[in-house]
Image (cartoon, helix red, strand yellow):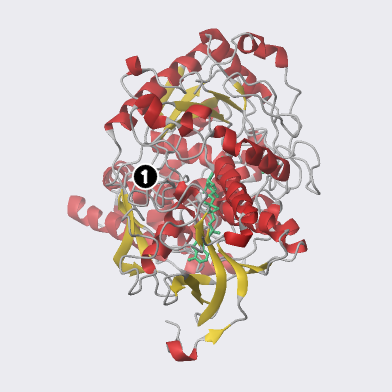
Amino acid sequence: MSVKPSKEKLVSNDPVDVLIIGAGASGAAMAWSLAETRMKILCLEQGEWVNPADYPTTSVDWELKSFGEFSYSPNTRKRSVDYPINEKNSPIKVANFNGVGGGTILYAAHFPRFHPSDFKVKSLDGVADDWPIDYQTLEPFYAENDQMVGVAGLKGDPAYPDKEVSMSPVPLGVLGETLARGFNEKGWHWWPSDSAIATEPYDGRDKCVNLGPCTTGCSQGAKASTDITYWPHALRAGVELRTRCRVKEITVDEGGMASGVIYFDENGHEQIQKAEVVVVACNGIGTPRLLLNSTSIAFPNGIANSSGMVGKNLMFHPYGHVQGMFDQPLKGYQGPGGCCIWSQEFYETDESRGYLRGYTMEIFRGKGLVSSAISGMTAGTIPWGKGHHDAYLREFDKSAGMVIICEDLPELHNTVTLDPDLVDSDGMPAPKIDYTLSENSRRMLDHGMARGKEALIAAGAYEVNSHGPIAHAGWHNMGTARMGIDPQTSVVNEWGRSHDVKNLFIVDGSIFVTSAGVNPTSTIQALALYIADAMKKRLANLFD
Amino acid sequence: MAELITSDGAFTENQRHVLQVIANMMIPASGTLPAATDAQIFPGILERFAENTEATEQICDHILTAAVQQFDADFGTLGEIQSERVVNEFRDKQPELVRFIQICVASCYYKDSRVMASLGVREGPPHPGGYPVDRTEWSLLEPVRVMGKIYRKV
Ligand SMILES: Cc1cc2nc3c(=O)[nH]c(=O)nc-3n(C[C@H](O)[C@H](O)[C@H](O)COP(=O)(O)OP(=O)(O)OC[C@H]3O[C@@H](n4cnc5c(N)ncnc54)[C@H](O)[C@@H]3O)c2cc1C
Ligand code: SF4
């Protein structure tokens, strides 16, 4: 335990105009966009810079490292910059990364946008809520973000309104083409995935060399994690980024405005940072945790929480896993592991399927040598003992599959609260997750896994198995500080400002109203750019 | 070598025997492929186990105790069939520890140069290097292009 000075003796730093908390996907985009205002902008991040030379793929033990110090799970990784999460009461476990770049350090870089219908769920299907903004509102910010990130893709996807791409799509390889033929055989939609991966040199980044394991960090620098996209630009434009600073609470003044934060520095000492504007970008779990931990006389239940919605409506994307065995080698370990092709044949609602809303089928590539052995042994398809080598040879590089990424609907009882006992290395309460899979999600998963099997069989698989929800796939954390027009039922307004505290903004996945059936990061970043733009347009009367 | 002696020393002889039996049960030699207990592979596996002595001690305690309970004998004195029975019962009851064992064994076994060569995979870490992937035949998309827009208008 670190010895902390009493409040009176806290170190106080020079005040700033804008304080951003969290240097991940959204915090980086916000910092870059606001930099042109020449305001004094500071970002506090609890983690550190990651040196690409330290990524697992530079070592022969790369797969082992991906199970340990580069695991998706903060509870496994257990770095001092991580916070533990009590997720015993959830079938889906949280995946994240805490450091400059946030989750984008480990993300697969699958980069779909939401669809127009995703913003109108209530009007179209009578469930959840409509967003207070629509696809058209975000469209220019999707485009701006795509430019900053560099998106590889192919124009003309019939599942989307027209959009530009920055460079040619990731190659499909034998595996992708095999599965594409399966979708064609079924007469179903498929398209090369939009991927935040440089397939050509882009903005100083080298091009992808098809190593495979993007989800352990890209040592080549081809994958668009924000430490190498937004941050270099933001820093050059004068933004200050202070690492190893874990914000403990957002403070308020007598007028009920945010006055700044108290944070733990690298040595566990508390410091005060005053700011005119506070922007929270800590992700769908870290943000409600921080807001709930920021109690005061004005906000006894946590700052910005007069609606009681902070920490409620937690949405993951329940994921199904479908895998097929093929006779021929598929060279699946070559090419970006998580990005290949997708199918949105079952994306839009069709009530006859027995559930509302829909899902995307995302094809993933093959596994590494060690993961192939472990997943085969866990699934029982690669035995211990005599048959081990034969079964391994039958499976290695001959499996292909997909994940089914289902839209999750917001439900009040799915929550992030503060754990009464569990704390992080600074003694700050850890988040506790309570989550149950809804009947709608269950049916959607079953439908998706059944269709996934059909597609794989059509592609030539001789054996297919599936399971879902995947336990360790809680990498999309959304809804826990939702956006809305009504202060009674939402935390931030239609441009990201807290209803309760007029100089407090939230820009990460927690402001999502619904989750859509696609990966969220392109929408998270487009929202951050849109909110930054709204702030810039209102600088003179931002707090009115 | 110093490292190997350290991890070797992390375990008692009984514990080492338990880990050796388990590793050999998981991946025995076959054809030209070595077993997980091969002299060039097993020391690395012991190192992995030594990184989490708590879990490893739990595994060994379970197995050593079960041998006494089931056969009233030390695990080290059991024949092949008996020791496999003890380990298999443990596998049914302790999936988390079994996953840990599989990671320790497979992560060392499948980076051995002989094993990698037999699978046609380039030795060493993935980066730097990478793989050339053939250009995609986009005519495959023709049936999809003719579909027309499929997203829902709002
Ligand atoms: C393995 C994996 C694969 C993924 N694949 C994809 C994919 O293919 N496509 C996709 O769209 N998304 C993917 N994601 C999800 C993606 O990473 C997230 O959607 C995205 O990073 C969320 O952005 P954010 O800004 O909300 O939060 P984050 O990027 O998580 O950033 C939050 C930052 O805030 C910091 N922070 C939190 N609390 C505090 C505090 N109290 N004080 C200071 N700092 C704090 C954290 O350390 C972190 O750096 C994946 C995630 C993982 C883990
Ligand atoms: S496949 Fe490409 S993007 Fe992924 S880790 Fe390798 S070089 Fe980076």
| Within-10-Å neighbours for mark 1: few <14, some 14–19, many 20+ | many
Residue A328 x, y percent position in the rendering: 60, 19
Q: Toward which corner of the image does residue B121 lie, by quadrant? A: top right
The residue singled out by tag 1 in the image is: A92
Q: Toward which corner of the image does residue A34 lie, by quadrant? A: bottom right
* Residue labelled 1 has its Cβ within 8 Å of some atom of ligand 1: no
Q: In which chain is the residue bearing label 1?
A: A
Residue A10 visible here: yes
Q: Secondary structure at mark 1?
A: loop
Residue A4 x, y percent position in the rendering: 45, 86
Residue B14 visible here: no
| Direction bottom: furthest residue | A9
Relative to A329, A285 lies left or right: left
Q: Which residue occupies 41% across, 63% down?
A: A291
| On screen, residue A421 above or below B25 | below
Q: Nearer the viewer, residue B56 or A88?
A: A88
Q: Which residue occupies 50% across, 82% down?
A: A269
